[in-house]
Image: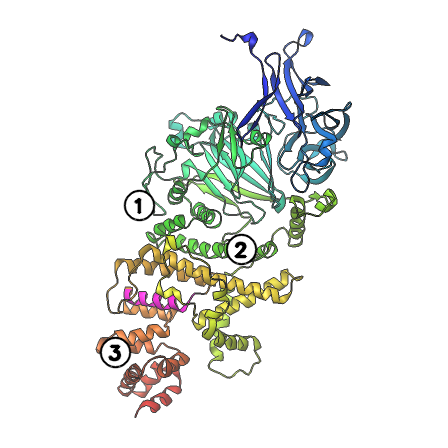
Amino acid sequence: MPVGEDDLKTHIGLACPDSKDYRVVWVFDKVEYVTSCSINQHHTLLAFTILTEMVDEFAGQKIYTAFLAEILTPNRLFSLNIERVNFLKVQFLHLTNKTGQESEFSDRQAYMLVFLHKESIGLYHIPLARAEDAMIMKRQPEKEQLIGEFLWSSWDVHNQRLHYIYHQHDDSVGYRKFHTILSTLQFSDNGNYDSMIDVPLNFPIPFMSKTSRPVYIDIPLCSVIPDRSINLEVITMPNGTFCICYQPTLSQNQPQAVTPEEKEHNITDEDLVDVTYFVCLVHHAHTLQGSVSKIPKHDATRRRILFTWFNGYLVVSLPGFFTHLLNVSIEYEPCNHILLHRESLYGSVCKEKKPSQPEDRNTKGSKANVNLDDSQHNYVSLLHSSSKRLQLRNHYCKGMYLSGWLVYDKKSQRLYKLLINKDQLLHLFSCCYLSTTRMALFHYILLHLRDYNAIKDIFVALSNDCASPEVQELLSEFLVSTTYLKMRQRVSKSILTVVPFTTADSFRGQFDKNQSNEILSKIQYHVFSNISISRKSVKDRMGFSRSADLWDTLRQHLRQNQIFQLQFPRFSTSKLAHQNQSTLIDIQKLNEVDVTDGNVFLTKLISNQSVREQSSSESEVDSIRTHHPYSVLGALPHFLETTKLTKQYGILMLLTKEAFTEFLIKFRKTEPQVKLENIAKEYVASQLCQARQLCQFAWSVNKPHEKRALYQSPTKEEYGLFQLFERISMALKEQTFPITNGFCTYFTTLAFRCLSLSQFLHYVDSGAVLLTDRFVKQVISDLKDDDVYSSLKYQIITRLSEVGYYSFIDFRIGRIVECQAVFLLTLYILSSNPAKVNFVFHPFGGQLNKVLAKYRS
């Protein structure tokens, strides 16, 4: 039987997304426009707001009306006697105890918030009584006014928090001079509440008088006041992250000049605008300001920026134009933001399936296609033009108690879950224009995605362009970021605040460009202060002891932030490079002269080093061995199996440990010194572990044969690995990371094969490669004693230090090789005049004659 328009009715249902259960709880007599709806914990009381059109002299004007209903028989309906022309919202509190169960107070009384936009927010106390198996109203509700006139509000249903914004007028200056304040009320399990924080907002929220008539957006079950002129979102995380996101209205944006190409398509200056957004980082006491250029005015007017949280990043997106992933968590200082724009990607946007294996991923000039359209798999890329039809909102998901990375499309009435396409992420890494964006993507893959297959694919791309200066920067980022990741598993959060997590500068502006060198977006920061946060701990508010919540963590972080002058000090390994280099020179001098200057520190390092060279594999290096990703990289190559260090890197490791210990003592004065020394040992051992893993990633790209003679010509794989190892060696020195003796030997072997003799000796003289004992032994054993190789052996042996020379002659090799070396040296000395001998063997001084006299017979 067909249903006529008069038979249509509005139903209110209760749905559970997990169990997929659905039941109707209220049926209207006709079609009603329900703008707000909420149900209590016992599912016995239903509050809702309807929007109706007035009649008589107010015909054409719409009014909001609030009701309260008992949904069990006999289904009584009560009017709250509230009618307003401005938005009216109702919301029940859902109280839980420390175990996450329903609070015992919910059996006695229900609590309901009533929002009267631009007027007040009230708390209704509804006494309950038990009738058979149900809870019904016992008597009339009691009203308590929480706040007065407010501009905007948001209800956090998961954490039972009320955020609201109001104007605080400065009477000493004038009524029109005001400060915009965001405050938060935290509700506890007994219905009590505490004012937790007041944040002065330093972005341009326009002043609105009480008599002005706002325009509201139709967002079902919205958790905020849906004022069209205010696109604002409060995002909080349990770890203390507190972000206030805001997009100004279009009238505050300025037109942007167009290029000649755009003029050819009849695009004028008035057709393009700059879209600006602000993110108040309360936990960092900074405001981030982002600006995106050249957005069509038609799209910027009709659509709103999406603010949501995803995998540790704040997502700011205007689908079809740009997507910014802002690294603004409380754990890190803001940096390495991922700024993605369609105009900043090389190549064209295609719809065919991407190749399964990456081909050529040169960092610049690539013509690879970026498959941004995955609609055939029910995926929609936020960068593809097809996503322009989306009208994504985050408020609906909060109102429906939905958690996770979900957003709601108002137009299609669909829920979308945010995902990262790993394959497309690698293509974006290859095709983005600026190196800063590539660095940000690499940082995300290392620290957040942690996918070894993706990291290996990036190393394949880097091996194709080893000459690029970006390669060394990316390798340095790998060392620092992965070391932080390893330390995060071993130390407390308070210690992590001083461990470096990136090589990039924090709180520094960032921008993105396209191939025409036009700036597409800019990021900058503004400092603000005077944050007022409650001193009540979670125990004071809840009445029982439990772990720290958002407010305790945020309060402690802001206090430390104030002590450290708005930025936590991070230990910097790169700053130790010059200091350690001068210390190494002083240590080398101590090997040649007696210690008479009382330099106890340097003497202690040398004495400790003698022990480390014998037992480094039994010390802290082995104590933190981790399981390597064998399924991706395979087993360790032979030259990385040993954890023994050369003397230079062993001393470097000790210097870093001593410096980090002093740093921890300075900023963590309350911790025992022995504990801080152990943490420093863990840190330098983690450095060594990650340096070995970096070499393993580079090795997995080419995998040449390890055991080849020195006189054999280099293969293509060996030459490619040598170039990558050279960049790794430079990154290790820049960040003062240690590396094992096996790597130094193998790297010197690759340099010997891949370089000419003059180039190789230049690398030795400059310290780019080290003449390890194993390499010198291989030189004498692999190379023949003809005229060419004898001269080469002579050139290598004469570049050994005095201590290294004695060690090589007396201990390291067998008697036959020893005699070959002595004979070679004696031959050159006897065939030369004394002046030449003194010049050539100047590094050995007068000790050489004693050695030759010992072996002349």
- How far apart marks 1 and 3 lie (CA) works out to 45 Å
> Circle 3 sits in a helix, a strand or a loop, which is it?
helix
Is residue 667 shown above or below 30?
below
Q: Residue at image x 72%, y 36%?
A: 104
Mark 3: few/some/many CA within 10 Å (<14, 14-19, 20+): some
First-in-chain label (1 vs 3): 1
What is the magenta segment's predominant secondary structure?
helix
Marks 1/2: CA–CA distance: 36 Å
Q: Quadrant of residue 668?
A: bottom right
Asked where in the image residue 834 lies, by quadrant, the reply is: bottom left
Specify the quadrant that holds the C terminus: bottom left
Q: Nearer the viewer, residue 468 or 408?
A: 408
Residue type pointed to by label 2: Gln
The residue carrying mark 2 is: 489
Q: Nearer the viewer, mark 1 or mark 2?
A: 2
Q: In screen coordinates, is 229 left or right of 855? A: right
Secondary structure beneath label 1: loop
Q: Is residue 749 magenta?
A: yes
The amino acid marked with disc number 3 is Ser
Q: Which residue is nearer to you in this view: 181 or 393?
A: 393
Residue 127 relative to residue 405: left or right: right
Instruction: Please report the bounds of the magenta region as a residue range.
Output: 739-753
Residue under label 3? 790
